[in-house]
Structure formats: structure tokens, C-alpha cells
Amino acid sequence: MYEAATLAGVMEDLTRQGFTEQFMPVGGGVRGVQSGRTFHAGQVTITAYHRFEGVSDPDDMSILYALETVSGIRGTLADAFGVYADPFVGAFVRDVAVRHPPPPRASGEALTG
């Protein structure tokens, strides 16, 4: 049986796995908050992603991407899901390769690659 995880819990788990950088969208790419380095889509791979749906509020939806760069920096990029999604994040991740795309899962389950 699958138990839905929280965004904070998954972020903590990914940090323990070495995804310590926090990425933010900038100028068609992402920048690491801690490293200050900027990467474009061709320099990043999505190694896992997790989608969360609010139990009490359908507007409370988010997606968390676990990213790995060509230089070995690993971190996360979070975005809202649906109408509140950041269009810059959406445009960026559409161009990023997904390592071993996961099979489709039921809504709310963690998707890992």
C-alpha cells in the first residue's frame, strides 16, 4: 500500500540522498541558490519527481523535481501544479531529459526514475 508523503518529508529524504542544492528558475535555466551556478536544460537531468495533491484544498498542488547537473550538483526544484504553476519552470522542465521515465502511477503517488 502506498502512503502519500508530504513535500517537506520528500525534500528531507532527497537531501539525505545528496540532493542538497536548491534550484530556482532564471533566464531560461535554473540557478543553484547555494552554488550560484546557472544551468540550461541540456545540462540537467530529472532523476525523480514527486507530485503532491492537497487533501483538503485542490488548489494546494505541487511538484518537486530532483535534478542532477552535468557537473554533479544535485538538488531540487519545486513548483506549484495547475493554474498556479510557474510558466518559467514549466518551459524549463519540458526541455530537460528524464532519466528512465517512470511508469504512470495513481494520482498523488511519488514518481521516481
Image (tube, rainbow, N blue to C red):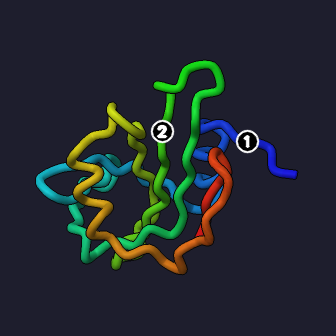
Residue situated furthest left in the rendering:
27
Q: Quadrant of residue 95?
A: bottom left
Q: Earlier in the sequence, mark 2 or mark 1?
A: 1
Q: Tell me: 82 left or right of 107.
A: left
**How many discs mark residues in the rendered view?**
2
Residue situated furthest top in the rendering:
56
Residue situated furthest right in the rendering:
1
Q: Position of residue 98 (x, y in %)?
A: 44, 74
Q: Position of residue 26 (x, y in %)?
A: 17, 50
Residue shown at the point (60%, 54%) measured from the top left = 14
The Cα atoms of the two marked residues, 2 and 1, are separated by: 13 Å
Q: Position of residue 81 (x, y in %)?
A: 42, 40
Q: Quadrant of residue 103?
A: bottom right
Q: Are marks 2 and 1 in contact (CB under 8 Å)?
A: no
Q: Tell me: 38 left or right of 74.
A: left
Residue shown at the point (25%, 59%) measured from the top left = 92
Q: Is residue 111 above or below residue 7?
A: below
- Dot 1: element: loop
Q: Tell me: 51 left or right of 17.
A: left
- As drawn, the label of residue 62 is 2
Circle 2 Cα neighbour tier, 10 Å, few/some/many (<14 / 14–19 / ≥20)? some
- As drawn, the label of residue 4 is 1
- Dot 2: element: strand
Q: Tell me: 86 left or right of 48.
A: left
Q: Is residue 72 above or below residue 112?
A: below
Amino acid tagged 2: Ser
Circle 1 Cα neighbour tier, 10 Å, few/some/many (<14 / 14–19 / ≥20)? few
Residue shown at the point (21%, 61%) measured from the top left = 38
Amino acid tagged 1: Ala
Residue shown at the point (73%, 41%) measured from the top left = 4
Q: Depth check: 7 or 57 in front?
A: 57
Q: Depth check: 81 or 13 in front?
A: 81
